[in-house]
Image: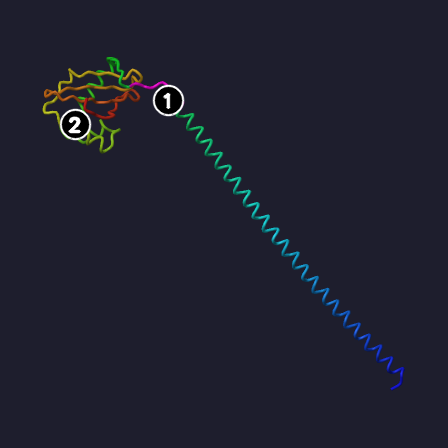
């Protein structure tokens, strides 16, 4: 083999080696680029997750703050209402005055009709006279009126109204056996409606 041929082969081998090294370096650089890009993407993804978590925490804090503020407002408003109710003038229904003659007469007539309807078990009349009462209210009335052994003397009935609400009428009745009951009637649009009956 001539010296020239040896030199040529040596150069070819060196060129191939250089080319291989260059390709290896390019491949390594490409891999590093891919790794760096993946790392950047991962960092960006983690940053977005942290950002979302922080935003969620801020939103939770805002919601909690809003709830606390609302609860505070409710407490303040409740205290205000309680203090207002405590200082407001009270209606004393126990202080009564004599009712006007017209409605006193109407109250006595209505009470007499109610007694008769209960004693005669007149359902149609009872329905007309006790329209504002529910089933339990009617049963209470029937029970109390049933305790009267004799029909009361309505001429002896006394009628009064609370000083603070003249639209309410208390009609007190006393039976022969000393039993006392009170009918409570309310004036609505000029008519008297039964509110209830209780022991006096």
Which residue is label 2 attached to?
A: 144
> For the residue labelled by badge 2, is the local secondary structure a helix, a strand or a loop?
helix
| Identity of the residue furthest to the bottom in this view | 1
Q: Image point 15% across, 26% down: which residue?
A: 145
> For the residue labelled by badge 1, is the local secondary structure a helix, a strand or a loop?
helix
Q: Image point 82% across, 75% down: which residue?
A: 14
Judge whether 98 appears above or below 53 on screen. above
Give the magenta-colored segment's residue range: 83-92
Q: Picture coordinates of residue 112 (x, y %)?
A: 17, 21
**Left or right, 23 with reference to 125:** right
Q: Who is closer to the viewer here, 121 or 56? A: 56
Q: Does the magenta stretch include residue 84?
A: yes
Callout 2: few (<14), some (14-19), or many (20+) C-alpha neighbours within 10 Å?
A: some
Q: Image point 50% across, 39% down: which residue?
A: 64
Closer to viewer: mark 2 or mark 1: 1
Q: Quadrant of residue 127?
A: top left
Which residue is label 1 attached to?
A: 86
Q: Do the residues labelled 2 and 1 touch (CB within 8 Å)?
A: no
Return the mark for residue 116: none
């Amino acid at each position: 083999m001539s010296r020239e041929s040896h030199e040529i082969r040596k150069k070819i081998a060196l060129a191939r080696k250089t080319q291989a090294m260059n390709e290896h370096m390019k491949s390594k650089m490409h891999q590093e680029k891919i790794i760096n890009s993946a790392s950047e993407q991962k960092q960006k993804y983690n940053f977005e997750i942290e950002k979302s978590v922080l935003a969620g925490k801020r939103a939770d804090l805002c919601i909690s703050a809003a709830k606390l503020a609302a609860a505070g407002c409710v407490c303040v408003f409740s205290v205000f209402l309680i203090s207002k109710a405590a200082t407001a003038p009270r209606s004393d229904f126990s202080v009564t005055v004599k009712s006007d003659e017209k409605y006193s007469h109407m109250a006595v007539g209505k009470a007499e009709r109610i007694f008769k309807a209960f004693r005669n078990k007149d359902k149609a009349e009872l329905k007309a006279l006790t329209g504002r009462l529910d089933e339990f209210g009617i049963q209470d009335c029937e029970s109390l009126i049933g305790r009267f052994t004799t029909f009361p003397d309505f001429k002896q009935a006394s009628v009064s109204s609370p000083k603070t609400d003249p639209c309410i009428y208390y009609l007190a009745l006393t039976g022969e056996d000393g039993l006392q009951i009170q009918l409570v009637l309310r004036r609505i649009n000029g008519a008297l409606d039964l509110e209830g009956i209780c022991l006096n």
